[in-house]
Image (cartoon, rainbow, N blue to C red):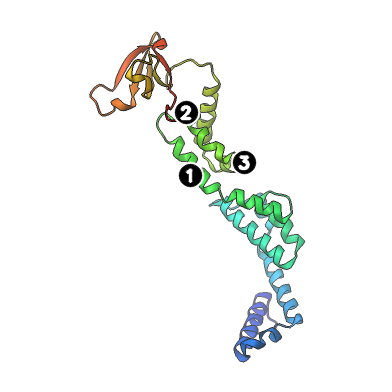
């Protein structure tokens, strides 16, 4: 009865395991003959070709944890290419990771992508803060600017829209209005170094909620626009 490819591979692995058990460990090198090595490599390659299309996987990655999955697969292919001096494996690793097909470029790209989970976590944390500003976001995002396109693909539509809105707001004329983070403009007032947010725009006047008044009965106060300035962290 003719064995299929999978059965042949399993049978060959069993033969090799039996050889290890039957011979002293110091003779192991003699059991893996050149012919056996070629046969095993050919069978493994055929099995992989039937189950994994690396180029298709690179174009349409898995839906769950896609970036990390592709990074690990790319590194595995890179290591395989190094161990076997296999140009095709190196090219496949480069396709998956999005880099040039050289060991140095692949290693650098893999190092970049290893930062991706932390980047997404840090950016989502700052975006979830009440009153988040473009400056708050940028203070974190600039550390990951080199992988912006990667972490951007991991964010939700709502998150990317918020980032765009924050950036647009930061490019507008410096006019204090609803949502502005402010402090008092008078350096002789204690509120000069305190942080507040404009929660209501009444036209000529603004309502500001002060952070350090959160535990007090009076949490907000009313000011003319020229009584306020944009808040800057005095500890920076």
Residue 157 lies, in percent from the top left, at 53, 36
Q: Earlier in the sequence, mark 2 or mark 1?
A: 1
The residue carrying mark 1 is 121
Residue 82 lies, in percent from the top left, at 71, 63
Q: Residues within 10 Å of mark 2 (few under 14, many from 20)?
A: many
The residue carrying mark 2 is 133
Choose between 10 and 97: the one closer to the eye. Answer: 97
Q: Earlier in the sequence, mark 3 or mark 2?
A: 2
Disc 3 to disc 2, C-alpha distance:
21 Å
The residue carrying mark 3 is 146
Write the residue at 48% across / 15% down.
175
Left or right: 30, with 69 as reference point: right
Residue 113 lies, in percent from the top left, at 59, 49
Q: Earlier in the sequence, mark 3 or mark 1?
A: 1
Choose between 3 and 115: the one closer to the eye. Answer: 115
SS of the residue under disc 3: helix
Q: Give the quadrant of residue 72.
A: bottom right
């Amino acid at each position: 009865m003719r064995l299929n490819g999978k059965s042949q591979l399993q049978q060959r692995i069993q033969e090799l395991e039996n050889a290890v058990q039957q011979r002293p460990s110091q003779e192991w090198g003699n059991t893996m003959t050149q012919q056996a090595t070629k046969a095993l490599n050919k069978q493994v390659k055929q099995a992989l070709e039937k189950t994994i299309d690396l180029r298709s996987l690179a174009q349409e990655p898995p839906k769950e944890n896609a970036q990390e999955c592709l990074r690990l697969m790319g590194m595995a292919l890179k290591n395989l290419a190094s161990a076997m001096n296999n140009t095709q494996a190196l090219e496949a690793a480069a396709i998956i990771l999005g880099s040039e097909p050289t060991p140095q470029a692949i290693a650098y790209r893999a190092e970049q992508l290893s930062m991706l989970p932390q980047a997404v976590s840090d950016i989502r944390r700052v975006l979830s803060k009440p009153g988040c500003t473009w400056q708050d976001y940028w203070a974190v995002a600039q550390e990951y600017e080199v992988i912006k396109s990667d972490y951007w693909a991991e964010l939700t539509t709502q998150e990317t829209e918020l980032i765009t809105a924050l950036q647009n707001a930061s490019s507008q004329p410096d006019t204090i209005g609803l949502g502005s983070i402010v402090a008092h403009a008078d350096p002789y007032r204690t509120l000069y170094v305190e942080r507040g947010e404009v929660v209501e725009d009444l036209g000529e006047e603004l309502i500001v909620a002060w952070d350090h008044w959160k535990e007090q009965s009076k949490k907000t106060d009313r000011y003319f626009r020229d009584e306020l300035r944009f808040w800057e962290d005095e500890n920076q």
